[in-house]
């Protein structure tokens, strides 16, 4: 018998919750620090990548890296079920487990000098936030910045203040839509995200579009953008699938031929077009 | 062709004793609960000698045969998979301390195992599992440890089953590579070859006699007979395009009417790799084990994301299984995920014929 400790890609690392921010009744943000200081300093991520977060005794879930702020890793989590409910109970000083970052993020490095368009739907859209922030922080590195975000109700909008700040930036457009809102509000359209397409100003031939939201919204938007003249290979989207391992082993995240955990979660539209929006994938 | 020798039946147990003295635990086939199953065995006496194994869609029967052979049956209920990629594996433990919990990695106890009786379809499947678990960006330490401690005694098939179609997938019945020792069984013993240094070491310890000229001829002839006897065949080697252009084919509905979504096919398939991770907390709440267990795309949970089950109908789950095996697997690993072993057909309680379904859905080019 040979028994030895082994390198184990499944093994998370201990991390401490430094701060917990309640964003809305069912959304909270953690600022985290790895217990191992060296690991904490070394940790790097690309915008759009995710971590597996572990709750003691309950389980692991995939969560996008929101950002690194004041040298702390931040994650924003919506409480939906078993693991996230247990996570919501934790307080500053408690420990969780983290392994990552995993997957392929947004192609930010290829966007220099081009117009950058974000189209997001749903609550928060964490996978896109760090990328938007990056483009917003260096307004001269990129062309125009266009942000289109839709929610059901105006009150679902996370980080409203952040969006208002982005609206003030030069060469930047922030367009918002609420699909179930009955009254008119300044800066808001009523309807789905596609009602915003007409008002968005960007160079369709020289842009990168990044989509994040429900599959139906992404496949519909990608098709419309292609019809409007955006080359398909300049359209990117971030997918969400059941994930158990995050390292291409468990098979749960398969999307046609792709393993969303390692080949994605960000894909170019042509890579996934064959099955995107097709029931059962 | 590598050096070969003949091992008479009377000397066959030498294989076991030599492997054992080299430190291997022997795993081989026996008749258990009316099927041929692999387990730890210690001598030839436990092998399924003189049996007849009849497999057809939805049925596996073992009876006494009118011969004295040990491997005169198509293949066992499982391939090599459960010995390497185990149905349940502890990945790590979290333990409470005063500062908060810490993670502990388990030790991997990789007991050297000699797998006796691997078939061509099993070895082809092993190669696929190697690609999946060992040669990706994140080599799996558990699989790798078991794999590196494995000794393989392959057997060329002398009998085909009604559900076998390895000739049409190009994986059998003759073993080309991937073995340490290889056996061709004749009426009074085995032609033995080696395929590795480990194999050579054992080979040299066996009391072998020269193989007769007829012996070689008979061995070739029985492989040719197996090929000729296989009735089932996939119509095309590459069905990827046809499957993905027929995602809405009516046949998916027809097969779903028969399918119980039990997942038996994925459990016996030697290439399926899906698993779930589960958490088992100790009763005192002080520690928790993180375990992986085999899972199946036929389970509803497999495609669950909050609020939606992506494959909420059997039709979509059957389509996932077949389109993965014969379609998307090609993009992932440059070949299909099916090695023609026929187990998914034999062990299907609804007797669904995977080959017939594939030919119906993706047969016409
Ligand atoms: C790449 C990626 C990035 C994500 N980023 C975020 C984020 O930044 N913030 C956030 O709040 N949520 C994010 N999610 C979704 C988050 O993983 C799920 O909400 C979470 O897994 C739900 O777990 P639960 O146990 O509370 O829910 P339950 O409904 O009880 O789910 C049970 C189990 O199913 C699986 N599961 C359920 N929903 C999902 C899902 N959407 N994706 C993957 N597995 C799921 C998990 O294994 C979960 O434990 C992301 C998902 C993916 C795939
Ligand atoms: S799909 Fe069926 S025939 Fe093919 S390898 Fe798997 S179990 Fe064997
Ligand atoms: S998705 Fe289905 S067919 Fe593919 S490996 Fe997993 S269980 Fe097997
Ligand atoms: S999450 Fe396990 S394979 Fe992608």
Image (tube, grey):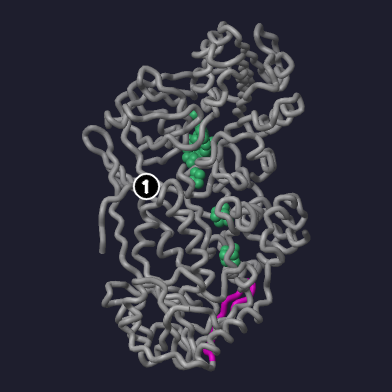
Q: Residue at x 60, y 51 (%)?
A: B331
Q: Is residue B118 above or below residue B238?
A: below
Image quarter in which the N terminus of chain A is found = bottom left
**In the rendered view, would you say A37 is above or below B181?**
above
Q: Quadrant of residue A167?
A: top right
Identify the magenta region.
Answer: B55-65
Given the current orientation, which residue lies at the most extreme left position? B98
Mark 1, secondary structure of its residue: strand
Q: Give the image location of residue A123, x and y in percent.
A: 56, 24
Q: Nearer the viewer, residue B204 or A158?
A: B204
Q: Main secondary structure of the magenta part?
A: strand
Q: Position of residue A80 (x, y in %)?
A: 51, 32
Q: Residue A127: horizontal and vertical position, in percent? A: 52, 27
B140 inside magenta stretch:
no
Q: Chain of mark 1?
A: B
- Can residue A78 be seen from the camera position used here? no
B167 horizontally vs B255: left or right: left
From the top left corner, tell me how far across and down residue B104 is, in percent. Answer: 28, 45
| Res. B133 image quadrant | bottom left
Is residue A211 visible in the rendered image? The answer is yes
Q: Residue at x 62, y 24 (%)?
A: A208
Q: Give the labeled residue for mark 1.
A: B290
Residue at 69%, 15% (x, y): give it.
A200
- A1 or B286, nearer to the observer: A1
């Amino acid at each position: 018998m040979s028994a030895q400790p082994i390198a184990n890609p499944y093994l998370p690392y201990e991390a401490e919750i430094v701060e917990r921010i309640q964003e809305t009744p069912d959304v909270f943000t953690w600022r985290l620090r790895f217990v191992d200081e060296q690991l904490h300093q070394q940790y790097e991520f690309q915008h759009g990548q995710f971590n597996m977060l572990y709750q003691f005794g309950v389980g692991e879930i995939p969560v996008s890296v929101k950002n690194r702020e004041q040298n702390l890793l931040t994650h924003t989590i919506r409480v939906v079920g078993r693991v996230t409910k247990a996570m919501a109970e934790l307080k500053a000083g408690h420990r969780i487990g983290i392994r990552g970052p995993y997957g392929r993020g947004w192609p930010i490095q290829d966007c220099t000098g081009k117009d950058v368009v974000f189209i997001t739907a749903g609550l928060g859209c964490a996978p896109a936030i760090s990328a938007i922030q990056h483009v917003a922080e260096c307004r001269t590195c990129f062309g125009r910045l266009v942000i289109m975000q839709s929610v059901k109700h105006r009150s679902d909008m996370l980080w409203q203040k952040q969006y208002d700040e982005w609206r003030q930036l030069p060469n930047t457009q922030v367009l918002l839509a609420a699909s179930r809102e009955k009254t008119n509000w300044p800066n808001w359209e009523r309807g789905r995200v596609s009602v915003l397409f007409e008002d968005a100003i960007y160079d369709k031939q020289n842009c990168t579009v990044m989509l994040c939201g429900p599959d139906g919204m992404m496949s519909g938007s990608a098709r419309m953008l292609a019809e409007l003249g955006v080359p398909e290979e300049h359209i990117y989207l971030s997918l969400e699938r059941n994930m158990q391992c995050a390292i291409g082993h468990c098979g749960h995240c398969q999307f046609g031929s792709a393993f969303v955990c390692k080949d994605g979660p960000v894909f170019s539209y042509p890579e996934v077009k064959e099955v995107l929006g097709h029931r059962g994938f | 062709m590598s050096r070969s020798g003949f091992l008479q039946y009377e000397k066959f147990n030498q294989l076991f004793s030599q492997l054992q003295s080299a430190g291997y635990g022997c795993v081989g086939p026996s008749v258990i609960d009316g099927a041929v199953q692999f387990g730890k065995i210690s001598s030839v006496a436990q092998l399924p000698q003189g049996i007849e194994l009849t497999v057809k869609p939805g049925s596996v029967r073992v009876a006494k045969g009118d011969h004295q052979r040990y491997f005169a049956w198509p293949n066992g209920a499982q391939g090599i998979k459960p010995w390497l990629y185990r149905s349940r594996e502890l990945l790590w433990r979290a333990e409470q301390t005063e500062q908060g919990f810490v993670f502990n990695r388990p030790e991997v106890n990789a007991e050297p195992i000699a797998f006796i009786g691997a078939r061509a379809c099993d070895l082809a499947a092993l190669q696929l599992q190697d690609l999946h678990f060992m040669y990706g960006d994140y080599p799996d330490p558990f699989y790798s440890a078991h794999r590196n401690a494995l000794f393989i005694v392959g057997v060329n098939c002398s009998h085909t089953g009604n559900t076998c179609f390895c000739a049409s997938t190009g994986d059998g019945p003759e073993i080309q590579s991937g073995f340490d020792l290889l056996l061709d069984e004749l009426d009074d013993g085995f032609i033995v070859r080696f395929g590795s240094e480990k194999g050579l070491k054992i080979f040299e310890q066996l009391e072998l006699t020269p193989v007769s000229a007829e012996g070689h001829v008979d061995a070739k002839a029985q492989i040719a007979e197996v090929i000729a006897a296989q009735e089932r065949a996939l119509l095309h080697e590459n069905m990827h395009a046809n499957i993905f252009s027929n995602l809405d084919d009516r046949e998916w509905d027809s097969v779903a009417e028969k399918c119980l979504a039990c997942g038996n096919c994925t459990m016996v398939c030697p290439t399926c790799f899906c698993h779930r991770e589960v958490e088992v907390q100790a009763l005192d709440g002080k520690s928790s084990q993180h375990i992986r267990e085999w899972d199946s795309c036929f389970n509803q949970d497999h495609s669950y994301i909050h609020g939606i089950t992506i494959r909420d109908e059997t039709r979509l789950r059957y389509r996932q299984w077949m389109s993965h095996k014969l379609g998307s697997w090609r993009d992932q690993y440059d070949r299909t995920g099916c090695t023609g072993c026929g187990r998914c057909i034999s062990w299907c309680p609804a007797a669904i014929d995977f080959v017939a379904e594939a030919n119906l859905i993706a047969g016409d080019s």
